[in-house]
Image (tube, rainbow, N blue to C red):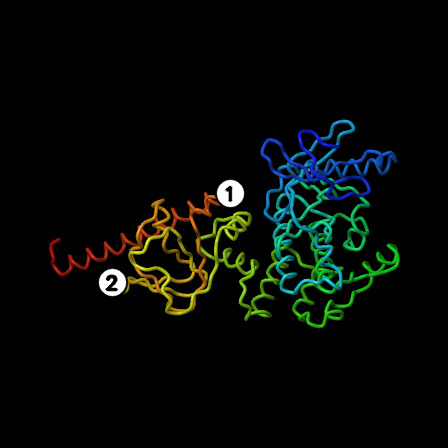
Amino acid sequence: MNRIGKYEIVRVLGTGSTSTVYLAVDPFNKQQVAIKLFDLKHLQDPKRAKINRKLLMTEASLAGKLSHPHIAKIQDAVMEGDINYVVMEYVEGCTLEQYADVDKLLPISTIAEIIYKCCKALEYAQHQGVIHRDIKPANILLQGETNIKISDFGAAVLQNNQNTTQVAGVGSPAYMSPEQVEELTLTHQTDIYSLGVVMYKLLCGKLPFDTGSNLSMIYHILNIDPPLPSAFRSEIPQEMDAIVRRAMEKDQSRRYQTWGEFADDLVVFFSHVAPNHTEIFDTEKFNTLRSLEFFKNFGDVELWEVLRVTVWRKVPESEKILRDGESGRDFFILAQGVVHVLKMGKSLGLLERGDCFGEMAHLAEHDCNRSSDVIAKSEVLLIEIDPDALTHATTGCRFQFADAFLHLLVKRLALANDRISHLLADKNQTGITI
């Protein structure tokens, strides 16, 4: 086979019981895509055919609807007679399945980072009315060290105000929540449970319930509490055990109620359990951005874009960050610490966490000379933005930057007007004519 529709086939990426996935090229934009082609020979059994067609329809209906940096995009879908396929974003890398083996376990901090990104992606999907329902290592793609993409939404529950679309009897038993194995009405908490099982498997290389049959596994899911992950990997801290345990609570009232709660506990893990690490994890960066005034109107998708186009660096106390008269266009946002702004050795003031500086060179749209010195008054954490890198961000992200700059300039003009008003008032009181 050389072609599927308009797409030129490169090679087979993998095969399953009802489909084959191909690497292909879109001839119009020359981008690589992954095409899942369904084999209708496996749809001859009426009951199974109905289920598989429903799964195909579910995945096809999401084409263009889930746009998040940690969700593999579904770009196109065709269902015409014997030709049934879904076109997806091609993610070069592997699934988490290979890191769920006891001999290939990832560092604990890396696992926490990956799970945090899954939380934020699935929170986004929930807000779009989508519950994945088949979260497992094989459906989470990994690029580089921690960049993930959640894939395979065929088993998803699609919700709206009028109805809920759900196919019973699908999913991977080892990762199913108690309510899913009982075929009860599902909420996003079923995905929270499943992600807890994924976390368990990544941490210790074992399933929480490793039984000889699905029937026995279902009994354990409903009735037995699994050993803590630290029972199999001694370096796992109790804080991580607690996160996994809460995600996998059988009682939904004791399980994480929201993705935000799950994600927040992972942030606390980084800040309290690993405070001395030198690397700045994406988990910490994202949480920092969310707390800064400059980024208050950015959505989660735009904030992940910010991480992609920024450089974060720690600057020691007394180091000069900008020099009066030097050329440059990069601008900076203070994530932590305090900087001193000086002109010809005279203090112009202090900038603190959340303040922006250097942006006038960016707004001028050409290299220009800096107008002051900026020196770290304490150790600071800087977010540095290269305007050229920002041009490669999404339109939504660039719009949010422009909006943030507008609010910043209005605020500074208001402060300047207040200062002038006070100055004029002081001069009038002393009888000085201007």
What residue is rendered at 58% in x and 69% in y?
274
Mark 2 is surrounded, within 10 Å at the Cα level, by few (under 14), some (14 to 19) or many (20 or more) other residues, namely few
Mark found first going from the N terminus, 2 or 1: 2
Residue 344's disc is: 2
> Split into 4 quadrants, where in the image is the N terminus?
top right
Q: Residue furthest top?
A: 81
Q: Residue at x 82, y 58 (%)?
A: 222
The one of 293 and 316 positioned closer to us in this rendering: 316
Q: Answer whether labels 2 and 1 touch (C-beta < 8 Å).
A: no
> Is 163 displayed left or right of 389 in the figure?
right
* Kind of residue at badge 1: Thr
SS for dot 1: loop
Is 66 or 12 nearer to us in this picture? Answer: 12
Relative side of 362 to 295, left or right = left
Q: Percent x, y for residue 372?
A: 30, 58
Q: Percent from the top left, x then y, of residue 315?
A: 43, 65
Q: Is residue 428 above or below residue 160?
A: below
What amino acid is found at the position of numbered circle 2 in the picture? Met
Q: Position of residue 124 (x, y in %)?
A: 61, 48
Q: Give the quadrant of residue 175.
A: bottom right
Q: Position of residue 295 (x, y in %)?
A: 47, 52
Q: Which disc number belongs to residue 186?
A: none
Q: Which residue is mark 1?
A: 394
Mark 2: secondary structure: loop
59 vs 418, left or right, is right
- Residue at 29 percent across and 58 percent down: it is 324
